[in-house]
Amino acid sequence: MDLPSLAVVLQAALSHNPDERKAAEHSLNQFQYTPQHLVRLLQIIVDGNCDMAVRQVASIHFKNFVAKNWSPLEPDEPQKILPADKDLVRENILPFVAQVPPLLRVQLGECLKTIIHADYPEQWPGLLLWVKHNLQDQQIYGALFVLRILSRKYEFKSDEERTPVYLIVEETFPNLLIIFNKLVQIVNPSLEIAELIKLICKIFWSSIYLEIPKQLFDPNVFNAWMILFLNILERAVPLEGQPTDPELRKTWGWWKVKKWTVHILNRLYTRFGDMKVQKPENKAFAQMYQKNYAGKILECHLNLLDVIRTGGYLPDRVTNLILQYLSNSISKNSMYQMLQPRLDVVLFEIIFPLMCFNDNDQKLWEEDPHEYVRKGYDIIEDLYSPRTAAMDFVSELVRKRGKENLQKFILFIVGIFKKYDEASVEFKPYRPKDGALLAIGALCDKLKQTEPYKSELEHMLVQHVFPEFRCPAGHLRAKAAWVAGQYAHINFSDPNNFRKALHSVVSGLRDPDLPVRVDSVFALRSFVEASKDLSEIRPILPDLLDEFFKLMNEVENEDLVFTLETIVDKFGEEMAPYAFGLCQNLAAAFWKCMNAAEADDEGDDPGALAAVGCLRAISTILESVSKLPNLFLEIEPTLLPIMRRMLTTDGQEVFEEVLEIVSYMTFFSPTISLDMWSLWPLMMEALADWAIDFFPNILVPLDNYISRSTAHFLACKEPDYQRSLWNMLSSIMADKNMEDNDIEPAPKLIQVVFQNCRGQVDHWVEPYLRITIERLNRTEKSYLKCLLMQVIADALYYNATLTLSILQKLGVATEVFNLWFQMLEQVKKSGVRANFRRVQDKKVCSLGLMSLFVLPSDQLPGEALGRLFKATLDLLVSYKDQVAEAAKQGDGEDDDDDMDGFQTDDEDDEEEGSDREMGVDTENGDEADSIRLQKLAAQAKAFRSVDDDDDDTDDDYSDDEELQSPIDEVDPFIFFVDTMKALQGMDPGRFQNLMQTLDFHYQALASGVAQHAEERRAELEKEKLSKAASGTL
């Protein structure tokens, strides 16, 4: 398409006629990959005679095409732009950056960012030369604009990736310094000068963000830069031309220059000028910075802050940054000494007024309470807020310099309380009282620990906080609720005071002002957590939940959901009557939050966080009613649409939370419905496509499907779940690009199949063993080796004859058993086992080995049987020892721990008991790992060990999930005795030979295991009778 034709098509893309517009867009898409298309678009963008609207459409199309196609996403993806076209774009885009209007420059800047990130320095070595040349010429703005993009590429790069920065700094900074010096000396500078200085500041910022370039370590060079920054810092911002609109004023060019200057000086101070955090090689620089500049900057900052005290203007971001600098100075003696003479003025006339409710707050409260709430709970807002920085300053001051400042500050606050109490209603200083309450809340941690204030907290709350629940000023009612929540956990000497505060907070849920209602919900969470007697809340629970959902319909706020979670968690099974309604309301709130988040192009809508909170709250509710399985059938239709949609790519942000809900629904529901089974293909598709990082989470529901609905898993052919599972597992196990850690759930799922489908999946034994052996041959991590070996152990337990014949058919039987025995015998330097360290590992291995005992002698020679027998006895001893140790540790744990399991550490010297009971001296102790049952009943935390003398970290063994299985009901000691009796009955001679070949040590162990088996049999029988007697059997 030639240039005039392209201009016509772009003009048509602006048409109000949808058909013409659609045809133009189709034409653009059709010709976008033709040679010269990109070059012609650029020609139209830079053509000053062309219609501005057409140029803008061209710039947007150009930017989007470059972003999508300049560099292929995948290494093997073909190039969609000809090299010659790329060369022409690179040659021609630079001169026009400064010439096009700002609206087009923004689009070209985005294109340059894409091209520079992809091509510099390898494909575009001449770029830096162009920048250097134009910094010396009349194209200064264009050169600075491009250099800013170039330097930003390396802002967050470190080590080798940062190397190009050194050349950039070497080639450009001398000229930058000359330009900067000339600009600073201009009398009555224009706004264009501010734009140039701002670009220089941004280039400097990106170049020093992570590391100071070596050129700046030259004291003369660095001092030249610092003189200019200090000049900008001290110089008053021109009054002429400042916008009157507050939003425009803070983004005005000269205030932007001031902000970037403060930003740079803060960064130099906190990252490079602090002796404590400096690398040894940079200590000299830190000393030089502290000595020559830190104090001067502090003085300038204090002078700038003084503008606020006298009623002048300072942008919020600049104020925030200056207060950060002051907070960082408190702990440094020399800086604190400089601050001290002016500290009272700073603290009481600048910092404290910033903490008080102000005109902007009042305007927002009245005109847009939703925005007031959003800003109050937005973490990003806190980063820029003068109020947050003021609170941080006070907290740091009393933490680091409390002796000389805490009492003084508290006396000041008490003085405000006193003035407030003494004033008549119409003259009460509501705003200072608001600031005083904010200060008291911000200092709660310090005051809770420090006498004499600690003893006076209850009195302070009763006298100065609780009365404000009835204050005519809404912002004080909100602040009272917030402060009450901060102190809800103190020990109230009079329970009535706690009760009154609780009821006041609950009443706040019905306040006419939205911010009061939200702050009351936030405070309620603390009161529910602190409440020792739920009878105060129980009668009002239905009304409380109603108010919650009214509020959730008004505002998307994750703190609302946190409070609801706390209530559900606290009341547990008592939430059953409300569970269905809660899930319905939370599901509705979830969809509302998701729709709000999708509508928000910036991606920072609080709805996204609140949506995650809704799903977490649903999980908490499902957990609380886990003993009422029929409720799950009632709740399922409400949650199914969420699970179906969010198990696709639409749910990537909430995938983990949705999987937890699927896990609960498939575990606690009395049966797994066909609707729930419809989620299986979605999880498989996600796993194959993008969700491999969630494999451990997906493992849990997949196990539930197989173990709790085994008949359907085996019988269903449309879809074929067995085939689906095989396709997924074989693909993952065979993938050579996947790390050992990533595939750990795969062998666990094979074990789930073998353990739950015993005798029903003979045709899958060989395929699964084949991929297990193949992966075992190239596995490096010992933990994955253990898991793969346990697949073989489970296959033996499933069917020993079939499994052994397959191993022999594959020609790996001897190799596998030799590796297995080697792994069983391997110990660490400390003497503990290196492999099969969890209780479940030992059990699976022992059941697999014992299943071989009854094979005839032509399949298992006597010598092999003897080796198996000894290895099994060692395993059983270790197993018993570990279970006993874990139980002992479990008995000593606090009853308040919400984990029902038990934990142990691997103490070698505490592992003797089992051997002694079995009549032999101790061997090298096994490792007592730790078990921890997780919230989800379908999971149990794996054993944790803390031995460091191994190449594999113990992380491999700690955050693992061991799933419930049919073998949980199998006692390995009883299984051992029954297997030996079977062997004796089948082949008495073989049994006799085995016993005679054992030395005294193993004979004693065998006798001890047999004795323990009978004890276990008696215990289990007793438990069975006990259950029958209590009517629970």
Image (cartoon, grey):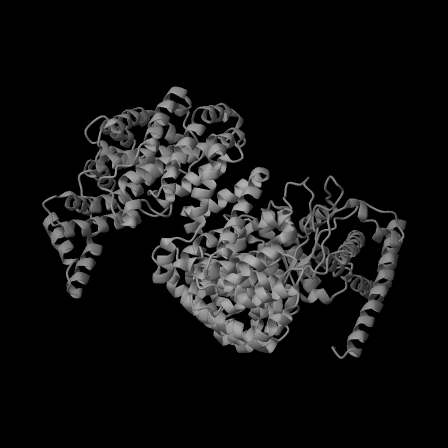
Q: How many marks?
A: 0
Query: Where 180 sits versus 941, above or below?
Result: above
The x, y position of residue 96, in whole percent, is 19, 38
Q: Quadrant of the C terminus?
A: bottom right
In this picture, residue 370 sits left or right of residue 64: right
The x, y position of residue 759, in whole percent, is 66, 69
Query: Where 883 sits versus 264, above or below?
Result: below
The x, y position of residue 146, in whole percent, is 27, 36
The x, y position of residue 42, in whole percent, is 18, 44
* Residue in view at x 24 percent, y 30 percent: 130
- Work out whether residue 47 or residue 530 is closer to the camera in this orientation and state it: 530
Is residue 747 visible in the rendered image? The answer is: yes
Is residue 660 visible in the rendered image? The answer is: no
In this picture, residue 289 sits left or right of residue 140: right
* Residue in view at x 16 percent, y 49 percent: 55
- Work out whether residue 871 or residue 201 is closer to the camera in this orientation and state it: 201
- Work out whether residue 730 or residue 312 is closer to the camera in this orientation and state it: 312
In this picture, residue 309 sits left or right of residue 829: left
- Work out whether residue 378 or residue 364 is closer to the camera in this orientation and state it: 364
